[in-house]
Image (spheres, coloured by chain):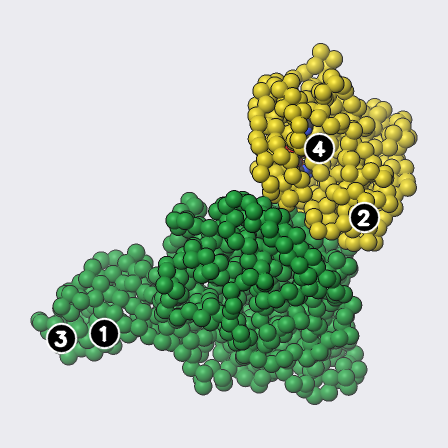
Chain colours: A green, B yellow
Amino acid sequence: MEPYKSQIGQPVSRLEGHLKVTGTARYAGDYSVPGLLYGYVINSTITKGKIISFDTSRAKALPGVLEVFTHENRPSLAWFDLQYADMDAPPGSPFRPLQDADILYNGQPIGLVVAETFELARYAATLMDIEYEEEAFDTDLRSQQHLARSPKIGMATMLKPLPPKPKGNFEKAFNASPNQVSAEFFHGTEHHNPLELFATTTVYEGKGKLTIYDKTQGTINSQMYVANIFGLKFKNVRVISPYVGGAFGSALRPQYQLFLSVMAALKLERSVLVTLDRHQMFTFGHRPPTVQRTRFSADNNGIITALNHLAIGETSRFEDYTEVVVNWSHMLYPAANTLMQYKLVELDVYSPLDMRAPGGVTGMHAIESTIDELAHKSKIDPLQLRLTNYTEIDVSLNRPYSSKELRECYLQGAEKFGWDKRNPEPRSMRRGNKLVGYGMATGIWEANQLPAKAEAILTGDGKLKINSAVTDIGTGTLTVMTQIAADELGLPVEDVEFAYGDSKKPFAPIQGGSFTVSTVGSAVKAVGAAMRKKLFSIAKKMKGGVFDGADLKDVSFEGGRVFITNDRSRSVSFQEIIAANDNKPVKLSKFSVPSILKLKKYSRAAHSAVFVEVEVDEELGVINVTRAVTAVAAGKIINPKTARSQILGGMIWGISKALREETIQDDGLGKYMNQNLSEYHIPVHADIHELDVIFVDEKDTVVNELGTKGVGEIGIVGMPPAITNAIFNATGKRINQLPIHFDMLL
Amino acid sequence: MNNFTYKRAESIEDALAQNNSGGNSSYLAGGTNLVDLMKYDLTRPDSLVDLNRVDGHHEIYETPEGGLLLGAFVTNADTAWHPIVEERYPLLSKAILAGASAQIRNMATNGGNLLQRTRCYYFYDANVPCNKREPGSGCSAIPGYNRIMAILGTSESCIAVFPSDMCVGLAALDATVHVEGPTGSRSIPFADFHRLPGDTPEIDNTLLPGEIITGIELPANGFSKNYSYLKLRDRNSYAFALVSVATGLELDGNVIREARIALGGVAHKPWRVREAEEFLAGKTADAASFGQAAEIILRGAVGFPHNAFKIELAKRAIVRNCMMALDPESQLPGAQPSV
Ligand SMILES: Cc1cc2nc3c(=O)[nH]c(=O)nc-3n(C[C@H](O)[C@H](O)[C@H](O)COP(=O)(O)OP(=O)(O)OC[C@H]3O[C@@H](n4cnc5c(N)ncnc54)[C@H](O)[C@@H]3O)c2cc1C
Ligand code: SF4
C-alpha cells in the first residue's frame, strides 16, 4: 500500500472543473422544464416619484403573453418587514418588489411580463404605457455629506461591529506630533457583475409545492425568504443552487428575480424562469460610494501616535447598510490616541450590498495610503514604519491575535519582490521612457466562524457521502469540503461525495465573508470525526476481536480501512464494518458551533503584505502594474491551488479597483450610465502581468478545529493602496480617488 | 427587440430591391452593432436584409491603379491579417487590430465598421434625451458625464464621437468608399464620408437611404515604411479610444516628404487637418516639428468638464505616435507597444 498522504494541503484540481469548462454544469437559468414560461422585468425609468397610470394592454394583446404583473394586480403578500428580511438584511425596511406605486430608485422593478418565450416577454416589456409623477431626488454622496448621520444598529452589526470608542486624546496628540498627514479619499459606486446573470427557475409542483433553481449564496436564505413572503410551508419550498457563476456578495441577499419568479409561478400555477439581463444587473445592490478622511501622526522614531479615520458611506432611504471601514487601522497600529467615525448618507438609490471585502478594501486603501505618506514625510522606509509599529495584540480591543504571521508576510514578500532595490525618492527609477515605482501595503480581514450542520453517510461500498445546504460560488467549496471529509476518514478524494447546494440538506449559513471553510468545513470535520468513532465502535464489536483492548486513539483510518496504528496487520475494512452493521449504511449528522467563550478572548484575522511595481508612461500617463507579490498568512491552507486562485482573483480585482472599474453615475439624471460590460471596465488579459502568491506558514489552534482563516477577501484588500503607493513612488503624485484614470497623471 | 422578417439577399440588386419593398428595413452585415441596437430597443427595423451571402465584394484584390480594394463584406479580422494589407498597408492592419476584440473582429465587416454608431452612453439609454437618437429631445452628454465625448467639431446639439479605429487608418490613407444605391453607383472620398453633427446629429454620414457600401479602395501609397497607430484608452484592450492617432510618413533621410495624421476619439468623424500635414512637408522629422503640427491639429479644440484633458493628451499622443513612426522596428509584430 502506498504511504498515506493527508488530503489537507493537496493542490486538488476543482472536482467540477470539467463540467464547467465543457458547458455541462447547469446554472439556475439552465433548467428546461416542461411548459416553462419566461418572465421579463419592467424597470422604472424615473428615479423618484409615483406611478400614476400603468397601461399594459398593448402587451397583453400579444398572442403568447400570459400576464403582466404590476403593483395593481399582484397577489396579496406578506405584511411585515420581518417577513421580507433575509440573513443579510441590514436594519430597516427591506425593498418589496411591486409593493405599491412609489418609485424609490432608478431601475426599480415595477412589473413582470410573463410569456411563452423570452424574446416575446422582452418585446412585450417595451410596449408599456406608464405615466409617472416625478419628484426631486438626490444620488450624489459628495454634495449631501452634510446630512451624514450615525447608522442604526441591528442584527447585521454582530458581524459588522461599529467603530470602537475613542482612545486617549486624538486632537492633542495629533497636534503635538512632529509628523502629521491628513488626506481625503473618494471611491465611487461599483457593481459586482458576476459573469452569470441572476436567474430563478421556479418549478411549480402543485399543491403549494415549489422547487426553485436560484442563483444564490445561500439556499436556506432563499428558502426562508420565499416561505415567509408567500406563506408557504418550509418543507414545501426547496431551493437548489448547485453551480453559481460568481456572485462576490451580490447573491447574499435574495434578489428581485426570485420574488417575481415565485410570485408568477404561484399565481399562474406554471413553472416560470426569470432572468435579468446585464443592464438589470445594475438595478440591485452595489458597493457604496464612500468619502473618507484620515489624519495620522508619528513621532520622530516613526512610532504612530494618533489615528483618526472618518468614513461617510451611501445607503438607501429604506435600509441602513453598513460595512466595517474605519476599524482596521487600530487593529494593525497600536496608537495611544484614536478617533474612529462612521456615518451614512441616505440617497435615492437601492441599498448597497456586500461586495468582496466590503468595507475592508475601502478602508485599507485610505489607511495604507496615509501610512505610506507618513513614512514619506518621516523619511522612513514604508516597510520599516510598519515593522516599527508591529503588534501581536489587537489594541483596538485589547486582545491577543489567535495567530499573526504578518511579520513573515512582510519579510518573505519583500525578499521575493526585491523591495531593497527601491529608491524612496519619487520619480527616481526609470525604464526607457517609463517611470518605475515600488509600493507596498498591508492587508487584513477578519476570520469568522458561524454555526453549521453536516451529515455523513458511509455506504456498503465503503464510500462516504457528505450533505450540506452550502453553495459553491465558484471558490472551490466542493473540492475543499471533499478534501476535509476524505482526510478525516483517510479516504482518497474519489471515494468521497460532497452533495451541496440544496436547502433540503443540513443547515449552512450564507456563503460570504471568507467564513465558509471555517464554518462548513468545521461541521464536515466534526461529522467525519463522529463517523470515525461510530465505525470504530461497530468494528470493536465485530467477530474475531481484531480491536480487543484497543481504543479509538490507538487506531488509524487509511485507504478505507481501520487498523491498529502500531500493528497494521490488525485491520478491518469499511465494507466489513458496514456488513457487520447488518449491511445498513451508517448515517449521522453533527452541528458545529464556534466556541464563543474561547474565541472571545482573541482577535482573529488573516493578514497579507502586498508589493507592487508599476510603470507609468511619463508623457501619456498610461499605468501598468508590471509585477505584484502578495504574501498571505491565513492559517491552514486546505488546498493551495484553489486558495492561490482566490488570491490571484483578489489581486486582479485590486488592479481593477485601483485602475479600471467604476459605475458611472449621472447625478443630474439620478442613474447609472454604463450598465454593460463594454463600458463597465474590468481588467482584460493585456492588463495583467506578473502576479505572485506566497502562503506563509501559520498555525492557529484557536480559530477553529481546522486552523483555517479563509482566503476569499484577503487577496484584494492590500492591492489598491500598494498600487497607489507605487504610483506615488513613480510619479510623486498621490491620487486618492479610485479608479485612477491615466489622464490624472498628465 | 421587436419581431422582424429576415431576408437573405443573393446580389446587390436583390438587396436593393428587397430593401425597397416598403416598410422600415435595415441591412445586416456582421450584426455586431445592429443587433445590440435592436436588443436595446433603440432601433426597430421590421425587416432585415442580410448582405452576407451577396455574390461578390467578399474579396481583397489589387487594383490596376496599384491600390487595393477591400470588399465591403470581408471581415475586419480577414482584412487585418490579409498578407497584402499586412505588407503594404500595415497602418490599417494595426488600426483594425486595436479595435474591439478578436471575437467581434471575426464577425464585423468592413462596410459595417464605417456605419457603426457612437458609443455615447446617453445614446444607448432610450430613457434620457439624446438629439442623435431622438432629434430635438436635447443632449444629455453636454451637462452630463462627458469624459468620452468630442473636443473638435462639436455642436450645441451633439458632442458625440465616432468610435471606429479602422476608419482612422482609412482616413489617414485617403481611402475611397464605393457605394451602390437605388439610383446607381458612386464613390465617396473618405474625408467626405462621415460628417460633423451640426444641427442634424441624427445623420452620421453622407450615405443616402438605401445605399450599400460595396468596397473601400486604398490608393497605392500605404506608408508601409514609416507608420504607427497609437490608441489611448481606459484599459489595454477591448475599450474604445479616448484618443487615437494614425500616422504615415514619407521620409527623405530625416526630412519629411509627406505626412498623414488622423485622430480618433476626438470628433464625430476621423479628424484630419491638411494644414498640419502641409506644414510638416519639408520639415525635419523630430519632436519639435510634430509638436507644432499637433498645435495646428488641435486648433479650435474645446473641452467639456470631464474631457478637457483630451486636448493635451491628443497633442502628446500625436508627437509620440509620429516619433514611433520613425522607428519601424517598434511597429513589428511582437514589438513592445510603447504604452
Ligand atoms: C463590445 C464592443 C466593442 C467594440 N470595440 C471597438 C473598438 O474598440 N474599435 C472599433 O473600431 N470598433 C469597435 N467595435 C465596433 C465594431 O467594430 C463594429 O460593431 C463593427 O465594425 C460593425 O460591423 P458589422 O459588420 O457587425 O455591422 P452591423 O452591425 O451588421 O451593421 C452596422 C450598420 O451598418 C449597416 N451596414 C452594414 N454593412 C453595410 C453595407 N455594406 N452597406 C450599407 N449598410 C451596411 C447596417 O444596416 C447597420 O446599420 C466594438 C463593438 C462592440 C460590440
Ligand atoms: S452627445 Fe450626441 S449622442 Fe450623446 S446624448 Fe448628446 S446628442 Fe445624443
Q: Distance between the residues labelled 1 and 3?
A: 11 Å
- Nearer the camera: disc 2 or disc 3: 2
Q: In this view, does A314 lie to the left or right of B315?
A: left
Picture disc at residue B115: 4
The location of residue A1, given as percent across then percent down, is 22, 58
Question: Pointer 1: what residue?
Answer: A534
Asked if badge 3 and badge 4 are on a common chain, one would say no
Q: Which residue is drawn at 53% across and 74% down?
A: A79
Q: Does the residue labelled 4 lie within 8 Å of ligand 1?
A: yes
Disc 2 secondary structure class: loop
Location of mark 2 (residue): B138
Which mark, residue A541?
Answer: 3
Host chain of mark 3 = A
Does the Cβ of the disc 3 residue fall within 8 Å of ligand 1? Answer: no
Q: Which residue is drawn at 85% across and 27% down?
A: B256
| Secondary-structure class at tag 3 | loop
Q: Determine the chain carrying the residue at label 4.
A: B
Mark 2 near mark 3, Cβ–Cβ under 8 Å? no
Disc 1: host chain: A
Residue A612 image position (x, y, % from top left): 64, 58
- Under mark 1, the amino acid is Lys
Between A426 and B276, which is closer to the camera in this rendering? B276
Which label sits in the foreground, 1 or 4?
4
